[in-house]
Image: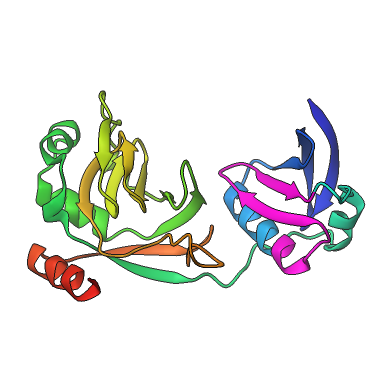
Amino acid sequence: MESGSLHLNGISWSVFRLGETAWLLQPKVSENVLEHIHSASDLLERSKIDGLQDIIPAYDSITLIYDSQFKYDPGKISEISPSREPHLSREKNIFEINVCYELGMDWNEVEVKTGLSKEEVISIHSTQNYTLAMMGFMPGFIFLEGLDDRIAVSRKEKPRIKVPSGSVGIGGNQTGIYSLESPGGWQIIGRTTESFFDVKKTLPTKLKAGDRIRFKPISKEEFDKVVAKNG
């Protein structure tokens, strides 16, 4: 049930309470939803509101996690952006991520479901510009928006017990990266040498929602050289 509403970054947001220390914000707009969420998340992060411990952007919402000693105050959030006009522009980081498509484990299924050859799928997948929509369902998993409909394929009927870290997959109309080894049901089409999650660091990941991603194909030989160099 909606707990109230507030004004943030030029638009109205519905507010829902999630337990004792969390609040969920949903934008009351139907266009540019992700842009509103990413811009508002950046604004909240820069504002350093007392007691606000974590800001978690998703596809259609932002979850705010508060220190239990502080009281959530919607007025303070509205005060950080008094303008009535939304600001969607933000400096977007652009990352080029290598992918060894030779390490894809589901090419037979992907080719059958798309009706395209492996080479055609690789060409389409590696020439798109993607937006990092959110991080989830586990630490460091990267959900990317912008997949070409021609290579959208359903998830596997039987998920794998173990998907290697760095695996690049397609799940429905999304592409994504498994930063950590885990179970998973996405169609795996390649693997990157990049590491996107380190729990030992203050900021475990260098990526954030709204960043732009491009994939660069590399050979198995190049992949092995980078892995050997990184130890």
- Give x and y (percent) for residue 157: 26, 23
Seen from the viewer's position, the closer of residues 35 and 57 is 57
Residue sitting at 46 percent across and 44 percent down? 138
Residue 165 on the magenta segment? no
Q: How many marks?
A: 0
Residue 52 on the magenta segment? yes
In which quadrant of the rendered view does residue 88 lie?
bottom right
Seen from the viewer's position, the closer of residues 194 and 60 is 194
Residue sitting at 66 percent across and 63 percent down? 42
Query: Horizontal placement of 33 versus 87: left or right?
Result: left
Seen from the viewer's position, the closer of residues 182 and 11 is 182
Seen from the viewer's position, the closer of residues 71 and 110 is 71
- Give x and y (percent) for residue 33: 61, 47
Extreme residue in the bottom direction: 229
Q: Is residue 66 above or below residue 108?
A: below
In which quadrant of the rendered view does residue 191 lie?
bottom left
Colouring scheme, one of rainbow, by chain, secondary structure, one colour = rainbow
Query: Horizontal placement of 208 versus 67: left or right?
Result: left
- Give x and y (percent) for residue 43: 72, 64
Residue sitting at 72 percent across and 48 percent down? 64
Q: Is residue 57 above or below residue 195?
A: above
Residue sitting at 11 percent across and 65 percent down? 219
Query: Horizontal placement of 206 versus 153: left or right?
Result: right
Image quadrant for the C terminus?
bottom left
Query: Horizontal placement of 61 versus 184: left or right?
Result: right
Q: Which residues are magenta?
A: 43-67
Q: Is residue 198 above or below residue 184?
A: below
Image quadrant for the N terminus?
top right
Q: Is residue 114 above or below residue 168?
A: above
